[in-house]
Amino acid sequence: MNREQIMRLRGLLRKESLQIVRDPSSIAIAFVMPVVLLLIFGYGVSLDAKRVPLALVIEQPNDDTASFAAGFFQSPYFVPVRFATVQEADAAMETRLVDGIVWLRSDFSRQMLSEGNAPIGLIVNGVDANNARLIEGYLQQVWADWLAKFAATQGLSLKIPVQVDVRVWFNPAVMSKDFLVPGLIAVIMTLTGALLTAMVVAREWERGTMEALLVTPAGIYEIILSKLLPYFVLGMGGMLLSVAMAVWLFEVPLRGSLWLLLASSSAFLLCALGMGLLISTVSKNQFVAGEIAILVTYLPAFILSGFVFDIRSMPAAVRLITHIVAARYFVTILQSVFLAGNVWPVVLPNILGLVFLAAIFLGLAYRSARKSLE
Amino acid sequence: MDAESKISPADSRKYTEAALTLESVSKGFRAGGRTAQALERVSLAVKRGIVTGLIGPDGAGKTTLMRLVAGLLAPDEGKIVVLGIDALSQPQHVQSIIGYMPQRFGLYEDLSVQENLDLYADLHAVAPVDRSSRYSDLMRMTGLTPFTTRLAGRLSGGMKQKLGLACALVGSPPLLLLDEPTVGVDPVSRRELWAIIHRLVEERGATVLLSTAYLDEAERCTEVILMHSGKLLGQDDPAAFTRRIAGRTFQIFAPGISKRVLQERVSQAAGVLDAIIQGSRVRVVTEQPVAPTAAALTTDNWEVTITPVAPRFEDSFVSLLKGAGHFAQASPIRAANASPGASAATAADVIVVRNLSRRFGEFYAVRDVSFTVRRGEIFGLLGANGAGKSTTFRMLCGLLPASEGTLQVAGLDLRHAAAQARGHVGYMAQKFSLYGDLSVLQNLCFFSSAYGLKARHQRERLDWALDEFELRPFADATSRDLPLGFKQRLALAVALMHEPDILFLDEPTSGVDPLGRREFWRRINALAQSGITVMVTTHFMEEAEYCDRLVIMAQGRILAEGTSEEMRARFRSDTLPNPTMEDAFVALITGVENRQAGAAA
């Protein structure tokens, strides 16, 4: 870089910093938006079933059924409601008053310790498959626990062949929050990064200043660099804030190193900022740029990154598309670094993927920026 | 170097003699499968060391030409050489030596005046040692010295424009491109800007290429390039343009005859190219340099006086366009709107405004404004952008409540009966507010149903609109694709669908070429003849001549009220024996500013 280039770049950077300080919109995107989204999603979205309304139908109440039912009333996972007949419970299920029915038949006490016939009927609302499976699992656990306790107090030997012993790796408490929050950070940073550059460049087009900038000796790479550097700093600030919230507010463990986290975040932020620059060459209007950013960066990041929906269970064509979704690599990296630690065989290929994508997005933005007045 | 290899030695002298050369340059823009030709085989040369004006109405191709020269666009064909450099192969090189001010000045509103200057000085790599002298030079030239710490967004339109100019000049460019620098700025600031530009050329020998849609600015340029719909109409000294029509311009006066009737009659006469209203007279451009006879002008035995007047640039532009067959003689306009409720005979006050104010926070957009408009009158609100015209208008249409004062439209108080009053009012908004995706007929249908027109009555009005405004051939055309003049006609038709007795026109002719403007005013005149009251805002000073009475507004207040002749007469002096409307306006504004300065001191 020669002296003139340095002078131009310094001028552009100073201008950009002054604008950041005086116009609160980019600060809002970088800091307020991640905080708000993380709070909403962090507290609102949960894959754990809690306080599930459950219908309890006991055809012939006795000591055994009372003791079994008590288990439900104590459980944090269920809110049981008593119904006299199965028909009434069915009606409640149809109106979604309850999500499941536990039906203790009249021969409950007789059948409970014998093999073959089930004394308990369970009907689960399968509309929400995820919830249904959780209820089923919880009920089995409650049943097994109660049986074991019952056998112990009666001095009987249990005829259940296998005692299930579940161990969950990486997320010992099976808290979906620990798994969700790192993924959320990736999704939120996708939107933040893309919006920062897309909106800021669109604003220059809208106000006619881009036209004036282009007719100065400043080269297109100087203009792009002057947009990347300040918003990279701002984006990293938002990233650190999100990580701090994850660790201290949501109490997600950070098992890997912070340096690895920062390095991969840098690669990812370049991708997101590059996408924003690319969007700004398509749309010169802040409103449209914002819409496009949400549509082509945020939604794919939410759906196709493996953050909630497992990529392996997607159709082959969709799996192929996920490879150009930068958040896909970052979700994997964040989940590993937060929950498992520095697992290099997982982290390294994903960082390379991010670097590759960043180069593509920035390259495309550079190429299309020149032609953008047409 | 690349550029030299492309330019042969024989050509190089030609290219270095002129500051700028275009050789058969064409440029089209594709949109929706069609190509709009912005420039068609334009060839021209801009001389060094003078101000060249690039003049033409909106859509003439001025901005495209500027952007091509600045290397922002590449031409489809042709060659552009700027200061001896090929703009096509070396746009960056061109950009490093020219100064360019785009239409909206290219300023950062949240940066201060000084910070904007610093940015452009950095971008042009002005050496730090040179800066302080250059800054003080530019600030003195533009009069911005007291405002260096103010944010650019807080400057007035005229000051922004001067700062934009200062930023474009900070690299001391030998060639300065200014794209419509005077648009939307008040006449006083416009004059100041012209003074700065002329000083620049005289003191530094800079070359300036400036585009404008104001035809009256042609006379301020040393040379003029005249453009219309992508084509070059001519390039010459502005006096040469007016010389061509010497002896063909006259003023006609017929005492006791309405100026509108006179104009309508005269414009139909054989041998008359152009007839416009000027005060109580009609200005005429003839095909031949012979004074028309009274008998040739009218068949009504009126007592007509015909006086020769000096030609203006606009006269020559119009005669060039009409001579080139761009314009077919318009058919006479029939009694435009046979509204039974409106009769020219009753001279009742239709709009009464008393002590009207509108405050936004601490800021008065309109302050203590009073006027009345009589039935069948064309009443003008004249002022620069930000003078309070549109705010007054919105209050009159019942779109914005007044902070103080009373407003009556068609005898109805707008505070209590805004919706009822709106039924009497036709409103043509700035930029026409049509639905671009709907066809002409669909727009008419929609707006007429919005005003409650139904069944047979609606069909009759639709037929009326299509015939009266000659829109039938375009009934199924998408409104967005219509030429501006047709959009304007459609917007006027839409505003008249429900047969209002009052018509509000907000900047109706903005951006329309002079011929379209003439046609539009012919229709408005016919409407006024039929008894409709017309209220119009405009920042085109010459359009004041069409109004029966007008008020001039600045900073939310009324500075003067009366006929255009009265206003011009107020400022007649020995040095200015024949002041224009703009002269009167400038004198009024500077008078107020001097008083304010006097009060402050």
Image (cartoon, coloured by chain):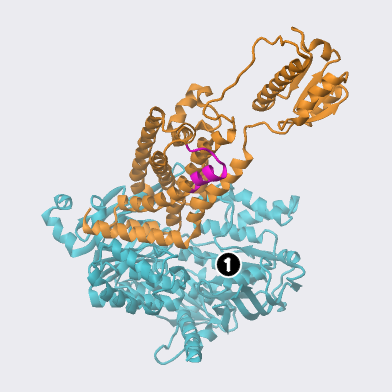
The chain that hosts pointer 1 is B
| Residue A310, percent from left and from top | 53, 27
The answer to whether residue B74 is visible is no
**Chain that is orange in the image:** A
| Residue B379, percent from left and from top | 61, 75
Please name the residue shown 15% across and 51% down the image.
B1
Nearest the viewer among B55 and A314 is A314
Quarter-of-image position of residue B339 = bottom right
The answer to whether residue B267 is visible is yes
Relative vertical location of residue B358 with respect to residue B511 in this rendering, above or below: below
Please name the residue shown 45% across and 84% down the image.
B579
Residue extent of the magenta highlight: A241-254
| Residue A223, percent from left and from top | 34, 53
Nearest the viewer among A130 and A208 is A130
Amino acid type, label 1? Asp
**Left-right relation of A109 to B204:** right
**Where is mark 1, residue-wise?**
B506
SS class of the residue under badge 1? strand
Quarter-of-image position of residue B400 = bottom right
